[in-house]
Image (cartoon, grey):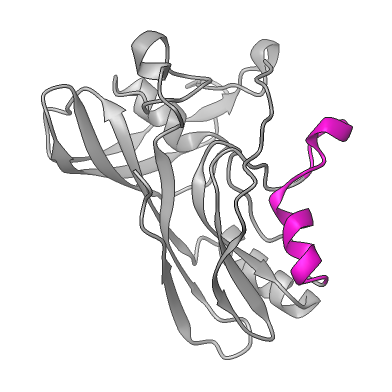
Amino acid sequence: MQTPYNPPSDPLVILHEDAEIVVVDKPEGLLSVPGRGEHLADCLITRLQIAFPDALLVHRLDRDTSGIMVFGLTPHAQRHLSQQFAERQTKKTYVARVAGVPAEKTGTVDLPIIVDWPNRPLQMVCHETGKPSQTEWRVLKSDEETARLRLTPKTGRTHQLRVHMLAIGHPILGDPFYATGAIADHPRMMLHAEELRFKHPQTGHSMRVRAKAPF
């Protein structure tokens, strides 16, 4: 499945920097790392390395998701942060606008996810072969047709939030992969990584970085 790649030209928004880490607000429409092919070479890490040549990847966001990403500036910082993500010691909070309004105010989606091989990079719910995946959600506000949710993933599967919202009947507005018709017809995917909590790799102090959703 292919969609045109037209990355934004906006300057990078740096949320925090010190000798060990740099935290960036990734714009929607920009790959985290290079894709396959010269036309997919432009990405966040290559742009970031112009200003921070030592920047090292720790985690990723989907191309169409905006929001907070942290990069290590030393091998130690990269290892330390990567371990925190692998051991689920970090806390990520997202904001999304979805189609429809959930009947409840809060809930948890607990549905296993696996790649949909014939249609990759799409993912799907599969109770036989899927990996355990959990997402907590809370309605922040709603109107007659849509709702604004806070999403807190407890696992880190590819496309987890997008697949889980689709599975409960509330696909994310503007999602080019999982939404259809008028639900997909938005200028961007309405999903933003708004807050990231982690321990600083050098000091061990807890850090909380926020970037308000642009929608």
Q: Residue furthest bottom?
A: 203
Stretch in magenta:
34-53
Determine the image quadrant of residue 80.
Answer: bottom right
Could one spot residue 45 in this view of the protein? yes
In the displayed structure, 209 sits above or below 108; it is below
At 30% from the left and 35% from the top, the residue drawn is 97
Q: Describe residue 39's horizontal placement relative to residue 211 as left or right.
A: right
Q: Residue furthest right?
A: 38
* Tally of marks: 0
Determine the image quadrant of residue 149.
Answer: top left
At 58% from the left and 40% from the top, the residue drawn is 62
Q: Position of residue 151 (x, y in %)?
A: 33, 46
At 29% from the left and 19% from the top, the residue drawn is 169
At 68% from the left and 61% from the top, the residue drawn is 58
Q: Position of residue 116 (x, y in %)?
A: 62, 18
In the displayed structure, 203 sits above or below 179; it is below
Q: Position of residue 10 (x, y in %)?
A: 60, 51
Q: Nearer the viewer, residue 192 or 104?
A: 192
Q: Describe residue 40's horizontal placement relative to residue 63 as left or right.
A: right
In which quadrant will I find the N terminus?
top right
In which quadrant will I find the C terminus?
top left
Could one spot residue 111 in this view of the protein? no
Q: Position of residue 81 (x, y in %)?
A: 63, 70
- Asked if residue 41 is among those painted magenta in the image, a careful observer would answer yes
Q: Describe residue 150's horizontal placement relative to residue 28 as left or right.
A: left
- Asked if residue 209 is among those painted magenta in the image, a careful observer would answer no
